Amino acid sequence: MVLERVTPESVGIHSKGILDFIDLAERRGLELHSMMLLRHGKVCAEGWWKPYNPASPHMMFSFTKALTSTAVGFAVQEGKLALTDRLCDLFPDKLPENPSENLRLCTVRDLLTMTCGHATEINTFDVAQPDWVRNFLSHEFKYKPGTCFMYNTAGTNMLCAALKRRTGEDLFAYLTPRLFEPLGISDVECFRLPDGVEMGGAGSRLRTEDMARFILFAAQRGRWADRQLLDPAWFELATSKAVETLSPVNDPDTPDWRCGYGFQFWRCVPEHVVRADGAFGQYGVIFEEKDTILILQSASARQQDQLTCAWETILPAITDEASLPESPVAHVLRHRLERAEIQPMLSMRNRAAEMQAGGKRFVPEKAMPGLADLIGGIWIVAPQGGKTQALRLDFSDDKAVLTAEQDNGVFSVDIGLESHFAMSALCGRTYGAVGRWRTDTCFEAEIRCAESVGGKRMLFGFDGGSLTLHCESTLPLSGGIAEKGPAAYALSAE
């Protein structure tokens, strides 16, 4: 089914409200990667901030949890799982020697509502405890299941492990004929945990329209076109408030995280609004009484500010009218979205430095990752591998080319030199890069993978026959998912 494209006014939305949202997000320093607004199942606004684009899937982080919830819904519909299934019965071979009473009580429903009873979350990637399922079940179940909300990505991953045990299929393989194929979603993938289970708590990548199709399916209570694929009662449960999110271990200072939680969906501050939610602003928002959906892909550590922008601008722009008179603002909005681009750095050329540094081959003095891992940004994907044996920058009229000679091949990316991102393909993924001379001896480049939330800011410091390369994330460090700090490499010219 092709999603119809219309103007905002034709479905009763003021274009100015959407334009105000973009302006307000930019004024507040919030980085948008894409947005799509739908009403009555029709797309009335869409845009991508270059180098992000319609064709590249984007890291979803915890938005993935809504997909996992839906997979559990299908399994319940087919009698393969039940909300009352106990973890002790699902994983009898992984239990600790003396399971606690709280562990014995814990069910699939408790995992869905983030109330399994844990007070802290296990490290799923702990190399000292590679059997993460056993580690989860051995972790203290401090609270009676169903009574204490604690956001627990490992608990969502346990749902995927349970699904695989009962169906013999991975999360996305199970969803493909039931959800992805009927909805026209293709080329999806999900990161795997050490034991091969797909990371349904955070590991998917989706295109903007893929998100829109899935959230539209949820808003339509499991219906797509003329087919009822999933029992509507499932989404009634999944998107309603099942538990309070305030608890002895969870007291957020962000209002939209204090409104209650369903089956991996969050309730929101405005009444009759619910969302699927991923780190750094991957949102699928359902305005239930407005028959409207907002999709956002972003890179913001200030997620509450992003939602507040939507509540202040887009929500008031959605009228109860079937249509509105066409507005010239719709043309302004369309033009703005067609030309959207991540704020690039101002161009600064240094021809003399380019002549001196360009074309030189610099060899690292210590082990250095391959180019894709060096510039990839924040990921939940497997490393691309390879070690860099030499780096070279070549300058031309409008771009530079960064080339890495590696032990597994030669790889390069283009860097735009005129305040716009140049696009390249590297290891099957799309990259955009822009650069300038910061000083007479320092070349600066910002490189973004269109499938990641962030990228790398790289400083090439030239000093005669040596090069010092500093790499840091474009996102502020915040612990948790964010990278642990900048890296520096010393290289020498041959």
Image (cartoon, helix red, strand yellow):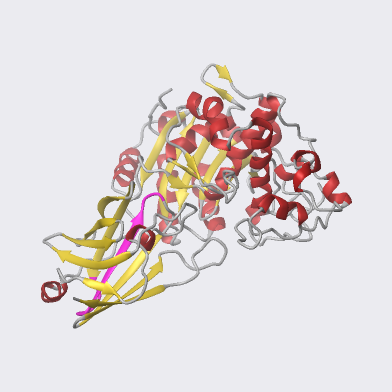
Q: Name which residue lies at 36% across and 54% down.
A: 449
Residue 155 sits inside the magenta stretch? no
Does 340 appear above or below 219?
below
Residue farthest to the top? 226
Q: How many marks?
A: 0
Q: Name which residue lies at 76% across and 35% down.
A: 83
Does 111 appear above or below 364?
above
Q: Name which residue lies at 51% across and 61% down.
A: 301
Residue farthest to the bottom? 464
- Image quadrant in which the N terminus is located: top left
Give how far across and how far down residue 388 sits, in percent. Answer: 31, 65
- Image quadrant in which the C terminus is located: bottom left
Give whichever of 398, 311 is nearer the camera. 398
Give whichever of 118, 444 is nearer the camera. 118
Give how far across and how far down residue 226 sits, in percent. Answer: 53, 16
| Residue 100 seen from this side | yes
Q: Which residues are magenta?
A: 437-451
Magenta segment's dominant SS is: strand
Give whichever of 403, 12 is nearer the camera. 403
Give how far across and how far down residue 472 sits, in percent. Answer: 40, 69
Give how far across and how far down residue 108 sits, in percent. Answer: 75, 40
